[in-house]
Image (cartoon, helix red, strand yellow):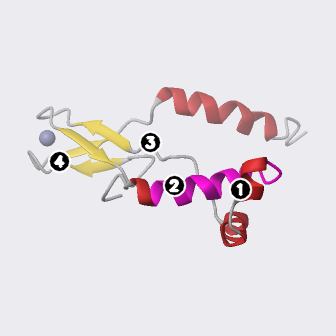
Amino acid sequence: MTDPGSIDEIVPWLQEAIAHFYPNSEYAASLDPEVEERAVHRLFLTPKTGASAICPHCGAPHAVPCLDELIALVCPQCGQPVKVEAPKVKQAAYWPSARTALPTDIGS
Ligand SMILES: [Zn+2]
């Protein structure tokens, strides 16, 4: 994202979001049919948090807004390779459901 957006860009997005998530609302009914049409086909994604890491060699912070996860990087500050540990909270959130989805009787 290059620009946070002006009010002229936010209002149409907000109208489409309301028409998308609350199609039977009074407000959605008052909108232009064109807005409703766009709202049906628009994908609404959760905002990306972006990945970040701090170089253990020189302490330089690195942010990668276009990626959700960062595995490794070469520090542009000191040139050292940096392996990034996955955040523990994220692993804990993902793994229990993956484990329960596995059959427990493999090999028996
Ligand atoms: Zn560094």
Ligand 1: image quarter: top left
Q: Specify the segment rendered in magenta.
A: 9-25
Q: Which residue is mark 3?
A: 49
Residue at left offset 32%, top offset 40%? 52
Q: Identify the secondary structure beneath mark 2.
A: helix
Q: Is residue 78 above or below residue 96?
A: below
Q: Position of residue 105 (x, y in %)?
A: 89, 37
Label disc, if present, on residue 19 of the rendered structure? 1
Q: Which image quadrant for residue 8?
A: bottom left
Which circle, 3 or 4, is nearer the viewer?
3
User: Mark 2 or 4 closer to N-term?
Assistant: 2
Some atom of ligand 1 lies within 8 Å of the CB belonging to the residue at label 4? yes
What amino acid is labelled 3 in the image? Thr
Q: Position of residue 47 (x, y in %)?
A: 51, 46
Q: Is residue 40 above or below residue 5?
A: below
Q: CA distance from mark 3 to mark 4?
A: 21 Å
Label disc, if present, on residue 75 of the rendered structure? 4
Mark 1 near mark 4, Cβ–Cβ under 8 Å? no
Q: CA distance from mark 3 to mark 1?
A: 25 Å
Some atom of ligand 1 lies within 8 Å of the CB belonging to the residue at label 1? no
Residue 12 painted magenta: yes
Give the position of the C terminus as an image quadrant: top right
Q: Identify the secondary structure beneath mark 1.
A: helix
Q: Is residue 53 left or right of residue 79?
A: right
Mark 3 near mark 2, Cβ–Cβ under 8 Å? no
Q: Position of residue 61 (x, y in %)?
A: 20, 37
Q: Identify the secondary structure beneath mark 3.
A: loop
Comparing 67 with 83, the one in front is 67
